[in-house]
Image (tube, helix red, strand yellow):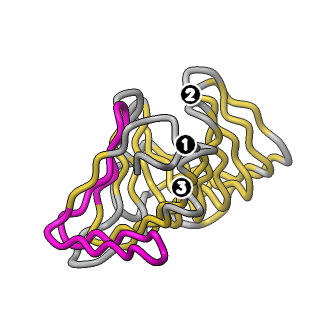
Amino acid sequence: EKTNSNIDTTIIYKGEKIDYYLDTEETYLNKNASVSNLETELKSGLIHVDWQKNLLKAYEKYDEIPIVVSNTSEPMEGKSLSFDLVEKKGTINKGKTKYNDSYYHGHEIFRHGNEVFYVNNSMYTSCDHENPHYYLWSNKMKMVPNNKIIARPLRLHIYDFPVFWLPFAVLPN
């Protein structure tokens, strides 16, 4: 959108079917859809962009789940995604990603800037199974890549059974 002066980067989008509604300034990208800028690409079965609100939403469709691929971090996937194109803040619902040979799962993952992630109802594990044998669980987790993880509370689960609890934890990352 060349007339949208709030967005500070070039956005390239594609899909097998593209519906653009001039009256509401909305774009729907269907099947093998993607939206990208210089450093990040979002792929999904359905992507909706509201150009008036500068809001992008992606949903699972055609067996294609939303996945974000970045030059600076591991891919992150989830059931749905919303992202503010101006504020550069987003939320991934039921998201998961891999980082430093570990796996993070979360009911909601919020990105603040390029470097800080907030995860609600999170699991952290080095087990690569879909249902991990062991994991650390937390209501709220803040992840600062290459620095630390702050969690409260923190519970160790083995086969979904809680075996250890801490009210607060700061872990090296």
Magenta: predominant secondary structure element?
strand
Element type where label 2 sits in the image: loop
Say which amino acid is labelled 3. Phe
Label 1 and label 3: CA atoms lie apart by 17 Å
Q: Quadrant of the C terminus?
A: top right
> Residue 12: where, in percent of width, then height?
29, 46
Q: Which residue is mark 1?
A: 5
Residue drawn at x 81%, y 46% as measured from the top left: 166
Say which amino acid is labelled 1. Ser
> Residue 71: where, in percent of width, then height?
34, 29
**Are there few (<14), some (14-19), or many (20+) residues within 10 Å of tag 2?**
some
Element type where label 1 sits in the image: loop
Residue drawn at x 19%, y 71% as measured from the top left: 31
Q: Which residue is mark 2?
A: 145
Picture quadrant of residue 122: bottom right
Label 2 and label 3: CA atoms lie apart by 20 Å
Taking the view exactly as shown, the residue that stands out farthest to the right is: 167
Q: Which residues are magenta?
A: 15-43
Q: Which mark is residue 83?
A: 3
Q: Earlier in the sequence, mark 2 or mark 3?
A: 3
> Residue 65: where, in percent of width, then height?
31, 67
Q: Is residue 63 above or below residue 148?
A: below
| Nearer mark to the viewer, of 1 and 2 | 1
